[in-house]
Amino acid sequence: MAAPVQDAAAVRDRAPVRDAASASSAGPWSLRHLHLELLVSFAAAGAGRLRGQARLELRCERHGAGAELRLDAHPSLAVSRAALLPPPGGPGDAAGQALPVESRPFASYGSALHIALPQAPRAGQLLTLLIDYEAGEGPGVCWLSPEQTAGKQKPYMYTQGQAVLNRSFFPCFDTPSVKFTYSATVKVPEGFTAVMSATSWEKQKDNTFVFKMSQPIPSYLIALVVGDIVSADVGRGEGFRRAPELWELSRVWAEPCQIEAAKKEYDGVIEEFLVVGEKLFGPYVWGRYDILFMPPSFPFGGMENPCLTFVTPCLLAGDRSLVDVIIHEISHSWFGNLVTNATWGEFWLNEGFTMYAQRRISTEVYGLPYTCLEAATGRVLLRQHMDATGEDHPLNKLRVVIEPGVNPDDTYNETPYEKGYCFVSYLAHLVGNQSKFDAFLQAYVNRFKFQSITADDTLGFFLEYFPELKEKGVDSIPGFEFDRWLNTPGWPPYLPDLSPGQQLMRPADELAELWAADGLNMEAIEAVDITGWRTYQLVYFLDQILQKSPLPEGNVKRLSKMYPKISKAQNAELRLRWCQIVLKNNLEAEYSKVKDFLHSQGKQKYTLPVYRAMWGGSEATRALAMETFSATAPQLHVNVQNYVKKILGLGEAEA
Ligand code: BES
Ligand code: ZN
């Protein structure tokens, strides 16, 4: 296991940035370590409890902290006792001195836990707080009934922290501006296994699992799963061996009925991505890299929990075609997990740099044409998003102003990803040389690793690293000012050149033209053989069809018949587009596919566009939306449920 490589002094010297989404008084404190002692129990279908204790090891960094400490928490988190432990080795009750504690309202997504300290701490003073609590009904802790799992035999629980949900899992400074190491002891019922986003995992007697994360991370990256899950090694790709003492073999985790498929999907490919990532961005500091296949209702394609990425089972496409999600989550090992956005308003620092890193790795492994094709599908998503919201929407800035009371999760959209990618590509374009820019990225990670930063830090470092560009005033070129990129909504002023992908995109563009014509030229259509097309070529083709829809009467029906590879696809990216096309063209005969798709999975980025399309369609599609939602709502993540309710005008329930 690699030793921690953090620059502790640098982390400590940085005063946390003010985060409007945190009720906590993190500012003067550093959290040196969090320990969770948890007992997990499943109750009736879809419910359960976590009972236990959080131990926070705090250091007061600055004078003037006051005699009150505030932590982020949630109304669903029941705190029974807070106590101050005596200093190690000193006299005092081992159970600690009980402290007055009170939960007060903060926002729709959390509350503030006020803890009264015996006196205001001195700078440099160490405090250990114990908090006994119970959790379970909050949005960060999801309890699934057996029917909601792949195997349908046993219940399942998982946590999802990003962005502000972990305050319903444990009390803490729930802000990405604060990093700390953690450990946990988790006792689970017989027949279940617990895994966490931790460097080490150990099963002890009595079904108790012990975890330790030895690198400092923000609260949102702590994650726990308890279920009937097993693991399998996914070996090393030939030719990509690293020194074994630095790196353990990757594993996949899944329910027993999916473990074969999981192993098959990614056997021998993970290490290559890690090796290329290290070559480009510097050491992979997290020790292991494992992947956990979640139940179908998991709301994201992937979640970069350190050491253990969580992914949707939709990735089990059988042909590795959705591996870009894995490359994306691996890229967060440097951008996001090592260099972290200090607030959710700077989320593009996590996602924009990660999209760039993902496409750098993809270029090295799969080549430029394929990567440009994938990036073109990303650009379509940005176009669709900006068309839907209007380019001038305030969320279409890279730096989002998140006002007090606004749930950061409600600001989630494509802009930080794809406009962020364009901005990072623009920085690379200014440098004008890929290997110089790669070297900059590596220096950037090295400079800010284990820290939480803002775009000012990033751009300041960029100009410092390239003094000749600073001299030239590249930050204020009219139309491309850094300030405009950050603070003005709108379509990216610079788009990277995706023309190397043309060889893959052109045939798809041309075929889409043919299908959009009045009076189909079947001879020309039949002359195009799509049997050898990659999934992303088909995705790109379908995006073009969707954009041209509704097509002339009868065309989509014929298209469906002609390409069962598309209309009967099991691949989720293809199914999403097909559903959108079916709805836009009122192809009633295939509405059942829309329903089936929504029943089969609960990923937010699939679910919401399909409901939007249904709600924006006919009376029949609206009825379909209502019927499907009432049948599937209990399976959806509570956030996704609320977003669908909003689309369907059902009024947003409080999260
Ligand atoms: N960190 C995100 C997922 C996320 C974002 C969860 C915000 C909660 C709040 C993850 O890395 C991500 O971006 N996933 C994408 C993958 C895609 C861009 C390849 C997804 O889920 O679709
Ligand atoms: Zn991401």
Image (cartoon, rainbow, N blue to C red):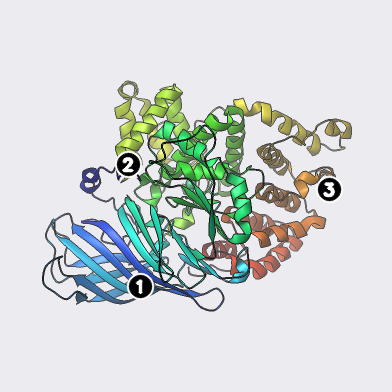
Amino acid tagged 3: Lys
393 in relation to 607, above or below: above
Kind of residue at badge 2: Lys
Above-or-below relation of 524 to 57: above
The residue beneath circle 3 is 557
User: How far apart in space, not on screen, are marks 2 and 1 (Cα)?
Assistant: 32 Å
431 left or right, relative to 510:
left
Secondary structure under the numbered disc 1 in the rendered image: strand
Q: Nearer the viewer, residue 490 or 414?
A: 414
- For marks 2 and 3, the one nearer the N-term is 2
Q: Position of residue 562 (x, y in %)?
A: 84, 42
Based on the displayed image, in which of its 4 quarters is residue 78 positioned? bottom left
Q: Which residue is mark 1?
A: 52
In contact (CB < 8 Å): disc 2 and disc 3: no
Task: Using the image as rendered, state which of residue 488 and residue 640 is in the foreground.
Answer: 640
Residue 96 appears anywhere in the view: yes
